[in-house]
Image (cartoon, coloured by chain):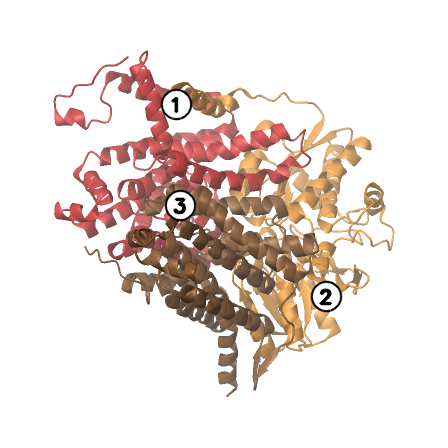
Chain colours: A brown, B red, C orange
Amino acid sequence: MQGLIEFIEISLTGLGMGGLYALTGVAFVLIYKATRVINLAIGEMLMVGAYLFFGLAAGLALPWWLAILFALAGGGLLGLLLERAVIRPMLGENPISVFMVTIGLGSILVGLVELIWTADPRRLPQFLPDEPIFLGPVFVFPEPFWSFVIAAAVIGVFVLLFRYWRGGVALRATALDQGAAYAMGINVPRVYALAWMLAGMIAAGAGMLLGSIAGLSPALALFGLTVLVVVIVGGLDSVPGVLLAGILIGWIESLAGSYLGGEYEHLVTFALLLVVLLVRPWGLFGTPEVERL
Amino acid sequence: MRIGSPKQSYAADEALFRTPTQWTWFGILLVSLALYPFMADQYWLYLACLISINIISATGLNILTGYTGQVSLGQAAFMGVGAYTVAWLDTHTGAPFFVNLLAGAGMATVAGVIFGLPSLRVKGLYLAIATIAASFILQFVFINWESVTRGMRGMNIDPPQVMGTALADPDQFYWLVVPIMVVMVLGAANLFRTRIGRAFIAIRDRDISASVLGIHLPTYKLMSFAIASFYAGMAGGLWAYFFGAINPESFPLLMSIFLLAAIIVGGMGTILGGILGAIFMTLTPEALRYGVDLLSPFIEDASVILSPVRTMVFGLLIVGFLLFEPHGLAEIWRRVRRFFHLWPFRN
Amino acid sequence: MSGYKQIAVLLVLLGMLFSGVVVAEEEKPKEIVLGASVPMTGPFAFAGIQLNAGLNDFVDWVNEQGGIEGHRVRYIGEDTGYQTDQSVAVFRRITSRADVNFYFGDSTAFQQTINRELERRDILLTGASFASELNDPERYPLQFMLGPDYSEQVGMLLEYIAEETPGASVMLIHSDTEFGRDPIRAARERAEALGLEIAGTIVTPPGASDISAEALKLRRAGPDYAIFHGYVLSPIPEFIRRARQMRLETKFMGTFYTMDQTMIDEMGEAAEGFMGVMPYRYFYDESGPAPIMDVIREINDEYRTNTYVQGWLTGLLMKTIAGETLRAGKALTGSNMRETLDSLEDIDTGGIFGQPVNFRGNSIPLGRIYRADVEAGRMVPVSDWIELE
């Protein structure tokens, strides 16, 4: 019985991280679906969001809710800027070049952050409630719990947006068939910009949540690597896939961390990645490429 | 001005150096490489050794990524395999250094083939990500296989001995690393005069058509991984000898990104690209350091901005070259040469 | 780009390549050179910047006092970004341009890597690393440490625990890095010898991530004490916060690099009652005679970190060792100075340490346990100076 409760507690804890993986994964998939760009700078975008929040809330001493709003807007702007300045000129290039460009972008963002805020470790102002939560005998930490709730809510909003909002429909249409979208009068470049902006906002939000759970330093950007695993496992172009994979990987990491030890967390994730790549490279719900050798 | 270079046989067409002028320049290059140690101080020799090691590794990666089209972010991890093999052999067997180096390169080749297996199944971006996974797994092995790697404590390696002298200083080590580099670069260049090299290029340009042409894709892809890892292993072994100590953090993912950036900046799919890229990327931080030194009278604590600026410039170089000069320095070099060939006419 | 521009670019590149060719340094007489690889950027920038400032201030001060036995001291420090390859590059550059007597290293990996080179160049090195691995005069004869190694630091914490609560259970929480793993084995042995129970070890993955699952382990074990090692800040405050949420009574402790007042301040509320080991006197600690601390306080109006003091300590030990060597009429080579160091007893550190210090192997196993008083914004000593045998 004790073992079972423990297992449930560990699993629930993992869901907190899982929610963040799913949320960031959605940002990643959004960009990929709209523009076919593998954005390796997602972790850095997330880190920039967290630092923006830090700068606004701790540096300029804004109230935390205002700081969050501005940081979200800043994340969106960053997304727009990256798309306009770097990604759009690269459209139609070899996908590998675009992928490398995003690696370069990541490096630029890290350098910028270190230039402005230095690499010293920081702490974000706490905005998540501090009271632990008991589900019967099961103890749940407030930070993972609330970050999961927020992530779920945001994802819910986005799913609704994609379904009903005009811009969301345009996004899906572009993802489905770019040519047809053009023909139907959809402004495809605008859709690209929109996708990057939304992804930037989501990433900034995830960054603030992550920063408040795990502390703030440029190392936050490493989170992007695990997100990469999440989207590959879930399927690059599948929102339900990343949601499931995000939760799954959060859960597995938590189990690995508890039963094996923290040093195994990354090993397990990347081993899972290799297995998925060998067995089902398009992921759980992704679209397999038709080309066969 | 040079007009035409008529070739009368296929052998002449695929020769590395086609004209006497090229032979002359190559000779001049070799001579200046041989004279360099007598002119430079220890620090610049140190840089020369480091550049040579980077050239070997970048050339290997260029064979895999630039010529075969298989993106790899695992090159540093394969260097690690080579380095650890050398370190282990050095501590436990005391075999001569060239045996260790070859064994290191051999072990790295094996690792490269194993981690190249996903390339049979996936390609492009998926492969890049699979190689990231490979580098994490190898790093885990370096950390946790303590009986062999001494874990986080790292391993020490004695300098290589040649006829009783230890090649410890850069001015001595130079004579080991530069010849190896020249041989390996020439080897890579010659590779593309053979069926194997041409098969690689065919795979890069269109794998399906290559397959139709009778190229057995799995064999050649794995072969490309094997060759690239051989170069990585050799570079890693030299790295271990050169620095004299390694630990699991010596070969991070960032180093793989550095090497990939080097071939992007230098020019993918040209031998010259790997060389120029490795030189350029190794020297850029030095140039930045000079720049910061110049700025220091005007900015307080100028050295504090050095490393963020270095990180930013690293990213800017990748982005800038991909956006504005996707064929890299090798292309610029080619244009400069053309300018002289056509001079006094405008190109 | 036009052809001419390209040629210009190439010429610049070639120029860069060959500009090192013509540098030749003339030697100045009677100078002691202290080279340093300092992490003024990167994750250890908070320490590196202070170290650099401490070394600079020390050198200014000692030269004002007339130098060391009539020798002026010159300090050359460069940034490494806490990267081993950069550190090595800096070492090579500094040593190829100046005749270095002393060197300051910035990390364990660097100090291991450069060891061979030290022996060949006969340079004495000290550094920011307290790795137990380096505390071995056989393998690292030309290196010494500026305090107790990490095993000894944790050992002092365990001694303190054994005294305060005999038979207590202790959890070791460390990062999955060379830094974090360092004292674990020794800690287990010492705990056993002291009759303490090691409740377990928690390893946290590298990079930033949620430590909730690890914190649950803490609750299961419910230890009386938990010792953090291998961190600077995160995830210590996060762990403490989680422990408070779980209503744990565990007392938390840390080692040198988490113990500076600035880090404790950064922890905020979580720091209350946080304990740890610190070999140096804090800037504001005015108990007892400490002439060098008085000098430091005179030069600086505001709080200076322990890493700044560490810079001074580096200089002071260098001054003692070099002065003694010169008085014995020997050249300032690494091996001569090592001999001097081995012969020194009860070294006076001007009050940076609370009592005269002695080297055991490569380290100075002396330190003191402090507890954070958040309201006063200070670390309060809770033990006397502990010297390990």
Disc 2 residue type (three-letter): Glu
Which residue bears the numbered disc 3? A100
- Residue C204 placed where, x, y %? 54, 64
Pointer 1 local density, CA inside 10 Å: few below 14, some 14–19, many at least 20: some
In this rendering, the count of numbered labels is: 3
Residues tagged 1 and 2 counted as in contact (Cβ below 8 A): no
Identity, as a three-letter code, of the amino acid under mark 3: Met
The image quarter in which residue C267 lies: bottom right
Residue B93 spot, x, y in % from top left: 38, 49
Relative to C226, residue B337 above or below:
above
Give SS at disc 1. helix
Quadrant of residue A89 in the image? top left
* Spatial separation of the CA atoms under disc 3 and disc 1: 36 Å
Tell me the CA gap for discs 1 and 2: 64 Å
The answer as to whether the residues below labels 2 and 3 share one chain is: no
Query: Which residue: 40% across, 48% down?
Result: A189
Q: Could you say which quadrant of the image residue C122 lies in?
A: top right
